[in-house]
Amino acid sequence: MKYIEIKAPAKINIGLSVLSKRADGYHNLSTFFYPINDLFDLLTFEPADSFIFACDSSSIPKDENNLIVKAKNILETTSGKRIDVKITLKKVIPIQAGLGGGSSDAAATLISLNEMFQLGFQHSQLINLSLQLGSDVPFFIKSKPAIGTSRGEILEYIDLEIPEPILIINPGISISTKEAFNNYFPDKNKGDFRSLIKNSGLEYSAMRVSIKNDFEKYIFEKFPKIGRIKDLLYEYGALFSLMSGSGSTVYGIFPNTDAAESAMNKFPKDYFCYLSSHHC
Ligand code: C5P
């Protein structure tokens, strides 16, 4: 049985509209998921006599509340096969930050264990299993730019590569996604970002007017520090800036690396700052 090492990348949301509340308690949304492939957690899978999960971070649960453990359990239940494996996680992506780190780890676990234990799940079955783990997990089965609708599991893949550097700033605040979904404000002034992204490519001046994140109002009011990051990114020359997911990360797309590096150096040293130049 082989040893697998896999990178679980981060994502940002370029626009996030909450459309309606559903009977199952979730919300229908519309968003554009964009992978940040050079910012990733690292997972390794090796054969073992029992199940072992090891992680270098003290801030994440090691029991069945961890999405990696949940992913392993769901594969065992669905396949009827026992999965004895040692999984090691090197955590790099900030936690509860709107960057999808936990969801990406879960998807990487489904993909790797399916291969390692020859479970035979096809792509559509992996998507179904991943949705049981979380609304963002299906995107990470492929981690390719995609418009996500429904809970985020209906994915329309878009051939788009952003050439500019993306500066990612996280102030170390943890946000509950559930709380954000209970307090969103649908922005009535936004345009149709689906057509904006598909037809016009990334026209940043139009994006600044039309592309919104419906969680920003509530989150910026509750944590002014997060809204301030967006103001500063624009002040420092970003072409476009938005909060990712339900926060607390805010990103800025910059015209060139010099401008992005200069902006990065101005943020407090205790913030998580990452300059991405090889996104996808
Ligand atoms: O799916 P996930 O576990 O990431 O969602 C966390 C919480 O966010 C859910 O329990 C739900 O309250 C809320 N949510 C929602 N609609 C979505 C995604 C998440 O209401 N599309």
Image: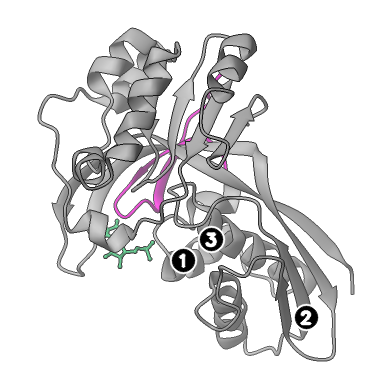
Q: Amino acid at mark 3?
A: Gly
For marks 2 and 1, give the one nearer the viewer.
Answer: 2
Residue displayed at 53% across by 40% down:
271
Which residue occupies 23% across, 52% down?
28
According to the picture, the residue beneath numbered tag 2 turns out to be 85
Structural crowding at the residue carrying mark 2, measured as other residues with C-alpha within 10 Å and reported as few (<14), some (14–19) or many (≥20)? many
Helix, strand or loop at mark 1 = helix
For the point 51% across and 59% down, which residue is it?
Answer: 103
Where does residue 80 sit, x and y in percent of width and height?
Answer: 62, 90
* Nearer the observer, 258 or 137: 258
In the rendering, at what x and y percent does residue 175 appear? 36, 56
Residue on which the image places disc 3: 102
> Where does residue 5 sit, x and y in percent of width and height?
81, 58
Q: Amino acid at mark 2?
A: Val
Whether residue 198 appears in this view of the structure is no
Q: Is residue 248 above or below residue 77?
A: above
Pick whichever of labels 2 and 3 is earlier in the sequence. 2
Image height of 202 relative to 48, above or below: above
Going by the image, does 28 lie left or right of 71?
left
Q: Earlier in the sequence, mark 2 or mark 1?
A: 2
Dot in front, 1 or 3: 3
Q: Is mark 1 within 8 Å of ligand 1?
A: no
Q: Are marks 1 and 3 in contact (CB under 8 Å)?
A: no
- The C terminus is located in which quarter? top right
How busy is the neighbourhood of tag 3: few (under 14 within 10 Å), some, or many (20 plus)?
Answer: many
Q: Which residue is mark 1?
A: 128
Q: What whole-number distance in Å separates the C-alpha atoms at marks 2 and 3?
A: 19 Å
Q: Which residues are magenta?
A: 143-162
Q: Quadrant of residue 79?
A: bottom right
How far apart are labels 2 and 1 at the CA level? Answer: 23 Å
